[in-house]
Amino acid sequence: GQQLNQSPQSMFIQEGEDVSMNCTSSSIFNTWLWYKQDPGEGPVLLIALYKAGELTSNGRLTAQFGITRKDSFLNISASIPSDVGIYFCADGSQGNLIFGKGTKLSVKP
Amino acid sequence: KAGVTQTPRYLIKTRGQQVTLSCSPISGHRSVSWYQQTPGQGLQFLFEYFSETQRNKGNFPGRFSGRQFSNSRSEMNVSTLELGDSALYLCASSLTQGAGANVLTFGAGSRLTVL
């Protein structure tokens, strides 16, 4: 079945640094979604991408839908402590969401 | 505007018991989906309900079932609990069915521990 490979699995960064994470797929996607999950909460949608090559920003977050439609990246600029959490990519092409395993972000104060 | 409400937030059961979890969607949302989150398998789709009908189902055994009421509230039930059923169960609602074109809003989840 369809698989989403998300990397890195975890990362520690210094406050103020930029962060980059990505997802690759074994199949072509029509929709790339990026979610963030804070401890004790459900995932919250950050950015939705619907077209190959699409580049979308949401504040300090920027995500792109790869040209091949098999990958996507999420960048966070000038990280702050509240960026801590788990970031998931997800495919919504099938009617239900298929999630990657997540990138756990920890920020050194 | 109230978000997605899940009850109970935490519960502990023993093997062989059954459990029922409840989800109240955002007002006006007619689709409710359920996901299981575990450290090993991550987030996995269980099923989706729209207009009181199951529209989509993930790859879970028949011990996992659900239903949706006329007011769009949903319940999921797990019978004959196994240790591996310990997980965070997340409910998400959206205006219509289908996760791709609709924004899913997740609840905070019900954390089930099976002893």
Image: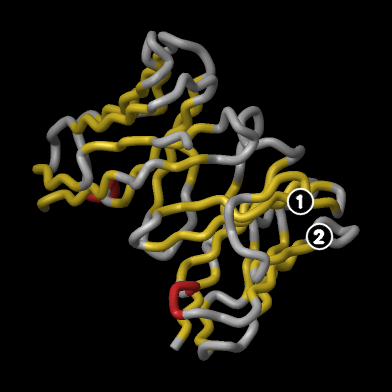
* Residue that appears at 71% across and 56% down: B25
Q: Which mark is residue A81?
A: none
Judged from the image, the secondary structure of the residue bearing numbered disc 1 is strand
Task: Tell me residue B112's x, y (percent).
Answer: 50, 76
Q: Hey, what amino acid is under mark 2?
A: Gln
* Residue that appears at 64% across and 83% down: B18
Task: Tell me residue A8's x, y (percent).
Answer: 20, 39
Q: Chain of mark 1?
A: B
Task: Tell me residue A82's x, y (percent).
Answer: 28, 49
In the image: residue B72, left or right of residue B39: right
In the image: residue A33, left or right of residue B30: left
Query: Which residue is identified by label 1?
Result: B49
Above or below residue A48? Residue B78 is below
* Label 2 Cα neighbours within 10 Å, binned few <14 / some 14-19 / many ≥20: many
Judged from the image, the secondary structure of the residue bearing numbered disc 2 is strand
Q: Hey, what amino acid is under mark 1?
A: Tyr
Q: Are marks 1 and 2 in contact (CB under 8 Å)?
A: yes
Quarter holding the C terminus of chain B?
A: bottom left
Q: CA distance from mark 1 to mark 2?
A: 6 Å
Query: Which residue is identified by label 2?
Result: B68
* Label 1 Cα neighbours within 10 Å, binned few <14 / some 14-19 / many ≥20: many
Depth check, front residue: A62 or A89: A89
Which residue extends farthest right? B70
In the image: residue A23, left or right of residue A96: left
In the image: residue B4, left or right of residue B28: left
First along the sequence among labels 1 and 2: 1
Q: Chain of mark 2?
A: B
Above or below residue A60? Residue B113 is below
* Residue that appears at 64% across and 57% down: B4
> Residue B60's image quarter?
bottom right
User: Could one spot residue A80 in this view of the protein?
Assistant: yes
